[in-house]
Amino acid sequence: MNIQNKWYFETITSDLMILYSIRDLIHFSQSAYQRVEIVDSVPFGRCLMLDGKIQSSESDEYLYHEALVHPVMLLHPHPKKIFIGGGGEGGTLREVLKHKSVDSVTMVDIDEQVVDLCKKFLPNHH
């Protein structure tokens, strides 16, 4: 579906709203837990949206995931077994696996559909 020139708004707080242009709707579905959309936005590239809120975007997801993972991993003397609660788009897992001391990682996300869709449509996150 081509939805070129469609504008999407996201309410951040009662005093702040962001408006951005969407090139294409890549995927839309309702999982057992939430509305899941993958969109191609003009300012942010491909984005994962859950219940109408951007969760992750191609343009800057690395900033979040690097800051989330590396300080903790570097403070631990020898991280070997890692648990990730959530993390369906795969960016946290990608950053954890950059550490050579890691032997195993278990990632659990409540929404299997989000994990599968991100593997398919957001391969740069994984």
Image (spheres, grey):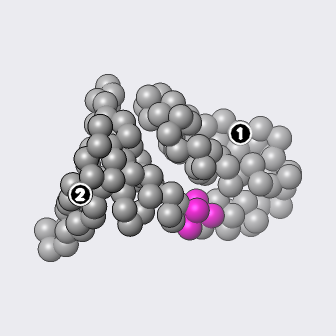
Q: Secondary structure at mark 1?
A: strand
Residue 13, x across and y down, in percent: 20, 67
Residue linked to disc 1: 105
Is residue 63 highlighted in magenta?
yes
Residue 91, x across and y down, in percent: 59, 51
Q: Would you identify the image quadrant in which residue 108 lies? A: top right
Q: Residue furthest left?
A: 14
Which residue type does callout 1 highlight?
Answer: Val
- Residue 44 bears which disc, if any? none
Left or right, 105 with reference to 52: right
The quarter of the image holding the C terminus is top right
Query: Who's the residue at 19% across and 72% down the image?
Result: 16
The boundaries of the magenta stretch are: 62-66
Left or right, 7 with reference to 68: left
Query: Who's the residue at 86% across and 52% down the image?
Result: 100
Q: Secondary structure at mark 2?
A: strand
Q: Nearer the viewer, mark 2 or mark 1?
A: 2
Q: Nearer the viewer, residue 90 or 6?
A: 6
Q: Residue furthest bottom?
A: 15
- Mark 2 to mark 1 CA distance (whole Å): 41 Å
Q: Main secondary structure of the magenta part?
A: helix
- Residue 5 bears which disc, if any? 2
Asked if 124 appears above or below 72 in the picture, the reply is above
Q: Would you identify the image quadrant in which residue 38 lies? A: top left
Left or right, 76 with reference to 52: right
